Image: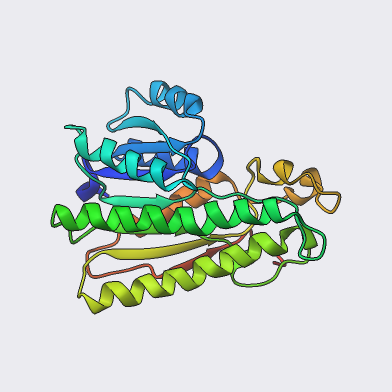
Amino acid sequence: MQRWSGRVALVTGASAGIGAGLVKALVKHGMKVVGCARNIVKIQELAAELKNEPGMVKAVRCDVSKEEDVLAMFQTIKADPDLGGVDVCINNAGLVYGDPLLTGSTQGWKQMLEVNILGLCMCTREAFRSMQERKVDDGHIILLNSVLGKTVGPVKASHFYGATKFAVSAIHEGLIKELKEINSGIKVTSVSPGLVRTEILYRMKSADVNPEVMYQGALDVEDIAAVVIFALGTPPNVQIHDVTVKPINSLL
């Protein structure tokens, strides 16, 4: 991780859960971290908490489902003399609503599509442009995927969310191919966690989901942060292509 010290990482969905854990881990390794979310108060609090660490945190308000917000965020990063651009882009922002395929709301589906797929694609595109403009050929794009992007879960409330993550799996493979076409040294890694203790299940508000039961034996945020740090720390000729992270003895 030494080569990343002083360089810039963007973490979307940085106000809580895995995103906040990633911000902490990257700052402790000396990175300048741009943390974005719709509500930046928690990221500002995180920045204050981490002020004595080797790196730094810049909080930016951004709804990744809105292109104008995404473009404005990247312009803010470009214009900041302490930042200048993005070297690492971690697409962590994600929404999950308990809207099943047969009875779910169109609005819930649309919001998941806009954040989990379009937001991820827009941030990836703009991060790539930032790297190209500055002739950065050793950047890294990380997609926070899910085990539900590889197999359909047993709970109907997760089925549409899982479909968005299957799309992320396809996007990951497409990015690998497009970067290979231009002989780029930029890496792309898909990280697919099993169940992680965050606020996500509580937000689903589904009768099929009991967070207190389901979170027993789940992964911690720090477990996922450790995997991301490992992927970032590999030598330039090594790419962690796709990694699945599950709690031991997990059935899913």
Q: Is residue 83 visible?
A: no
Question: Residue 217 at what x, y percent from top left?
Answer: 70, 51
The answer to whether residue 170 shows anywhere in this view is yes
Residue at 38%, 52% in the rendered image: 123
Give the side of residue 193 with respect to residue 178, left or right. Answer: right
Q: Would residue 229 be found to the left or right of residue 80 on screen?
A: right
Toward the right, the furthest residue is 207
Q: How far across and how far down the image is residue 40, in percent?
A: 47, 28
Question: Where 223 sits versus 80, above or below?
Answer: below
- To which quarter of the image does residue 193 belong? bottom right
Foreground pick, 246 / 117: 117
Q: Which residue does the image show at 35% across and 41% down from the upper left?
A: 26
Total numbered circles: 0
Residue 150: x, y in percent?
Answer: 60, 72
Q: Quadrant of residue 31?
A: top left
Q: Is residue 177 left or right of residue 171?
A: left
Residue lying farthest left?
A: 135
- Report the quarter where the C terminus lies: bottom right
Residue drawn 48% across and 50% down?
Answer: 92
Tell me, what colour scheme is on the image?
rainbow
Q: Would residue 131 appear left or right of 154 to someone viewing this image?
A: left
Residue at the (26%, 77%) spot, across then down: 180
Which sits in the foreground, 5 or 59? 59
